[in-house]
Amino acid sequence: MPKYNINYGDAQIDGGLFLKRKSVVSSSLEYKDGEGDQFKHLSTFSGRSTIKESIIAALKNAKRYVFFTSFLIQDEQIIESLIDCVKRLKGHVYVLTTLKDRDFDELAVMKGEGDFDQWNFKEHMEGIKELVRNGISVKARKDCHAKFVVIDDKYAIITSANSVPTCFADIPQKNGFVREANPENGVLIEMHLEVLRLSNFFRYIWRSAYNYYMSPDSQVLDICEFSKNIIPIACREPAIVPGKDQVIWTAPNDYRILESLVKMIDMAEHSVCISSWVIKGIKGHLLAQKLVQATERGVEIEILLRGMYRSDHLESCYFLKQSLGKQIKILGDFCNHSKAALVDNKQAMLMSANIDSQHGLNSSVEVGFLSTNPDFVESVSNYLNRLRAGCVLEFIANPTQNHAAQNHATLYKPVIKDDFMLNVEQKWKGRDQKVNKLLTEMKSQLIRVSSPRGKNGQEMSLYTNNMIIDCVRQDAKSLNVLRINETPRAASLHFRHILSKVKIKINVS
Amino acid sequence: MAPFKISIEAKKQIWDTHSQAEGDFAIFLSKCYFHAIEACVSVSKCENMDEFEHFVLKAVVLLDVAGIEEINSLLHIGRQVIKRIVVKLVADELLVEVDDGVIEITKLGRKVVETKVMMKLEKKRHIFHFLDGSNAFLQINNNHRFLIDLQANETPVEWRFDVDSLRRCINQTDGWKKQQQFPTEIFDLITSHGQDLMTDIDVESTLIVDKAQVANCAILVKYTESKPSGLFAYPISLNGRLLGADWLFSLKGEDEILSAFPCITNVPDSEESKVAFMLSGRRYFLKDFDDISVESQKTCTAIKVRNDSDVNWAKFYWQNFQGNVFFDIELGKTIKMNKLMIIGKSDKLRMVKHLYTLNKSCVADDHLKDLATYRSWLSEQVHLADEPIRDLTSLAWDIDNYRLAYDLAELEDIEDAKI
């Protein structure tokens, strides 16, 4: 006789997750980047990247020097263009990027997500070595997540896109699946003073606020250390004229991106739309307070994110959803990496910073562009409309377990779809307490099922938020539990599907 | 010396090893044949001399030929004492009894009177090395393992050694011996027919043996005021690899060097030099040699360049300033390598020199930290003209010195834009 009979599926879960939207506007919505007198909006959507086109064109047209900043550089065409450029200019190409794997790990945030984006530090370093071998000078700042290019002090490109293939193009996978390009955004600006503001920002880092460097040399490929410390950036810049176009940034003790966001939200009368790859650490953050205040004034909030299943991301979404109620809508897609903010169709900003209290708003080096120029605002609005049209997911707070299972976006067939028995036959220390805890978690959490593994695919794991239950399939209707581990890591592990409504018998012997 | 073939890589290695030598120099690559002469010699051993004995010896020198009485009448120290001293001095071979009671001083005795140092002679066999051809004595340094023994049929056709060469060395002054590292303790050559033949020496032990040996050498000749002042020969392997950092033999003094190696004075004519330069110039991808003239001098080869528009000339200039370029030419049986001196007034040459000065002092100095420091360094310290930085950067890039190109480029590119 089984010891426990569980009717899994009807309970509401604590927290929320991204689920399929009921009605979605076709993602084939036509889109064209906007442009104005001294700017051109840039983007990447599946099928085309005007960001990459513009970077390559800018490199081709450079006449005096190039300041190139990207957290990662893996795209072959960008690497080739940089090399062509340095040969043509006979030097004068300056690249600021990442040179240490620990800095990559720190800013890339989660290895699993990095894999999906095909961020690969080893591949990145191969590209960097190729640049150095061909005479390009490379430096790195531990906390630099910005992506921008300045050409001849005449124009600049600010973007959310790393120089990585997934940020620019659809990538066919070995299994036949095509991984669509990340939605990315950017802007090419020609406002003289703002270009100088950005170029002097770069110059300051290059002169004295970097950590590592690789001298251009075809033989020696050593990474040298300039400083262990995170150095403030005190560059010479033009006076800030409120309300005008402005290059902004995050740097140590300099939170212009956050301050600008806060000001924008404070001024919002009708709507705030924010796009970000991730949203993290928002609970208790100034930005959340401002969003709450805005909703109290009747402002509608919309956040467009990548619909990732990772605990920090989901926790922040849940917090906002709980705090802002019906006045916030959080939509998601599978690849979004853009970062933008739009308020009342009057002010717009795009940046390299995610809505991340740890990296982006309060620390790291990030760059953005803020403007009230109607053409620019319209361009960002159009971009966000196009992005929204591709959002097939919506964050839902406290769905039932079964609703989550039915509406979770997955391409795979479920491994477990019928009632089954969990046999806990092996004995280990604290077994009964862990079984009891599992029973408790089943009442308020999702059970996620891993892909089968091992010989004949007999092994698999079930995940709650805090537990990993490793099992081996005994027959079609029963799993033998090998071990139950408690770990916070379980909340973010990849899974194949969410368990739908089933009866689970647990036999403890 | 004999014909000698060596690869360019080996020449480069030899050049790189020695090209940092100070002052003027030339390097000769040659096969050197040696007469390893093994001969019986008397070797002196020295000790301080007794004052009385020295008086007696001096008295005999003064008197030329003397008996006990004559010496005593000069020194007044008593006949018995003088007799006893004379017996000892005869035993020490400083005096010899030529007739009953009549004594005279020996060659060794005269030397002892001069030096006031008591010398005793020992007989032993010793090996001396002489260069074939010039018969110049060469003290082979440390070990002989780099000298290869030759069979009789492997020696040069005219294989001959004049024993008088050894004798002349033995009879040289101590100053000469020290300079040429000839062993100063060798007192005399003992041969079966010599004047100093000792009655108890058998003929066999006095045989002079001439063993033929050979070594490939890189010979560094240093010049002072255009005259050879020092010569150092380093052993090299058959394929041209330098064998260790120690020289095999050395010579000092113009006369000694020229007498041992008269061929080092040979200078090729302009046409030979130009052909040789064209060969080496191709290693630097230089082409179109119509607009150059080449003149060889003792210690360097002067190249006059009238058209250096090709970028490879900049690389060539740079390498030459760095001391990496050498001119090499076959002169009879030797190969001569020396520095190149480029003569010209082109912008390119001037700017490469500027880069060279800049790069050389960059290591110790920080004068490229900003534009102001650089300009002050230019005018106050090196008195160089202020070349356009962008042009210097491009030139540094052309000569593949990317680091220098960036050090220069950053002066302008990374200077804050004026707002």
Image (tube, rainbow, N blue to C red):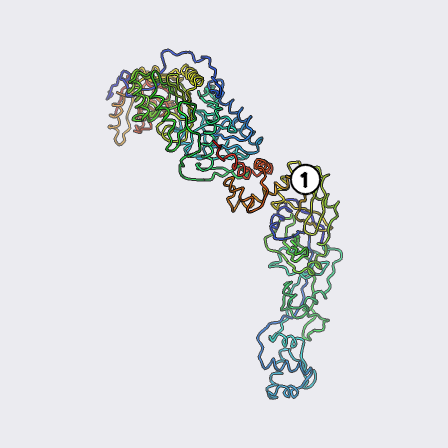
Q: Residue B118: x and y, percent?
A: 60, 75
Closer to us: A424 or A35: A35
Q: Is residue B413 left or right of residue A364?
A: right
Residue tagged by mark 1? B282
Closer to us: A125 or A134: A134
- How many numbered discs sit on the rendered protein? 1
Q: Residue B381: x and y, percent?
A: 55, 47
SS for callout 1: helix
Rate crowding at label 1 as few (under 14), some (14 to 19) or many (20 or more) other CA atoms within 10 Å: few
Q: Is residue A360 left or right of residue B230?
A: left
As drawn, A93 above or below B265 = above
Q: Residue A243: x and y, percent?
A: 40, 22
As drawn, B146 above or below A215 = below
Closer to us: A261 or B48: A261
Asked where in the image residue A352 lies, by quadrant, the reply is: top left
Closer to us: B213 or A281: A281
In this orientation, does residue A49 appear?
no
Asked where in the image residue B60 lies, by quadrant, the reply is: bottom right
> Label 1: chain?
B
The N terminus of chain B, quarter of image? bottom right
Q: Residue A508: x and y, percent?
A: 25, 24
What amino acid is at disc 1? Arg
In this orientation, does residue B289 appear?
yes
- For the point 27% across and 24% down, which residue is it? A438
